[in-house]
Amino acid sequence: MPTYRDHAVVLRTHKLGEADRIITLLSRGRGKVRAVARGVRRTSSKFGARLEPFSHIDVQLATGHSLDVVAQVESLDAFGGPLSADYPAYTAGQVMLETADRLVVEEGEPALQHYRLLVGALRALGSGTSDGPRPPTLVLDSYLLRALSVAGYAPSFRDCALCGLEGPHAAFSPSAGGAVCERCRPPGSARPSPDTLELLGALLEGRWAATRDVAPRAAREASGLTSAFTTWHLDRSLRSMAHVER
């Protein structure tokens, strides 16, 4: 069988037969890939631990008829180890993996931006951002907003998302796409504080220096709006989101 090599992040696994697993990967060159890891559940397996969720790997795959087959694995980053010792970071990472799995739908289609964003976010959870350590919830909210933007659901936090009227505006509606003016405001829209909208804009753009002195109330409100926006555009809630400490 022909083979190919790629860098990838393990998103999830599930059992197959008595000793195998199906591994779902988000790869650099081929987007989402599902592959069989033969005998990986045996204690004698030479690369079982490298194919757990959160693993960033260099993997060689053999092309199969329905599923590719894992032929060789080398570890690049073992994100799972440090995250498993930090519950808030671990649960935030679980949401990231589930989000990437949901947003990258087509298998075998390139998804380089999603791959880079996920690797960067997992690295930030473990070692901090370029501006120093950040709370896992802020890293998660930044990842969600940016991943949704890459998928075509970029929120607006200043100008009206419906008519484009220059802002800032006082109302926010996930279904409308973000900030809305009074004329376009749907019933039930939230009215977040200006600090919250400024924080959301900084998280979307990766301006970490602007998040250093954020008030706890603004951070909580931003997390709630990010969760609502994510749930709306994914059509249903993320199962792992219920375990995140916000």
Image (spheres, grey):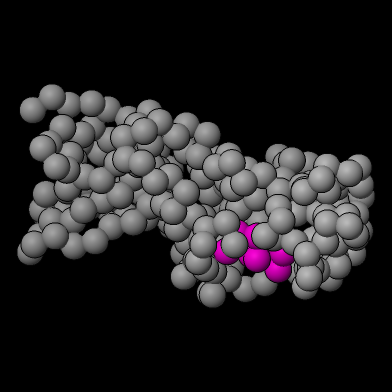
Most common SS among magenta residues = helix
Q: Quadrant of the N terminus?
A: top left
What residue occupies the far front of the structure in this picture?
A: 183
Position of 215 compared to 21: left or right?
right
Q: Residue at x 38, y 36 (%)?
A: 31
Q: Residue at x 57, y 56 (%)?
A: 233
Position of 98 compared to 192: left or right?
left
Q: Residue at x 46, y 70 (%)?
A: 239
Position of 193 compared to 94: left or right?
right
Q: Is residue 223 magenta?
A: yes
Q: Nearer the viewer, residue 216 or 227?
A: 227
Q: Nearer the viewer, residue 123 or 46?
A: 123
Whether residue 195 is visible here, answered yes or no, is no
* Rendered image quadrant of residue 57: top left
Q: Is residue 126 magenta?
A: no
Task: Pinpoint residue 225: horizontal percent, then vertical percent.
Answer: 72, 64
* Rendered image quadrant of residue 67: top left
Task: Pinpoint residue 162: horizontal percent, then vertical percent.
Answer: 77, 48
* Rendered image quadrant of residue 15: bottom left
Q: Residue at x 13, y 56 (%)?
A: 20
Q: Nearer the viewer, residue 196 or 122?
A: 196
Task: Pinpoint residue 59: horizontal percent, then vertical percent.
Answer: 28, 35
Q: How many marks overall?
A: 0
Whether residue 167 is visible here, answered yes or no, is yes
Q: Is residue 206 placed above or below 246 in the rendered structure? A: above
Q: Quadrant of the C terminus?
A: bottom right
Task: Pinpoint residue 99: horizontal percent, then vertical percent.
Answer: 49, 55
In magenta, the rendered stretch is 222-231
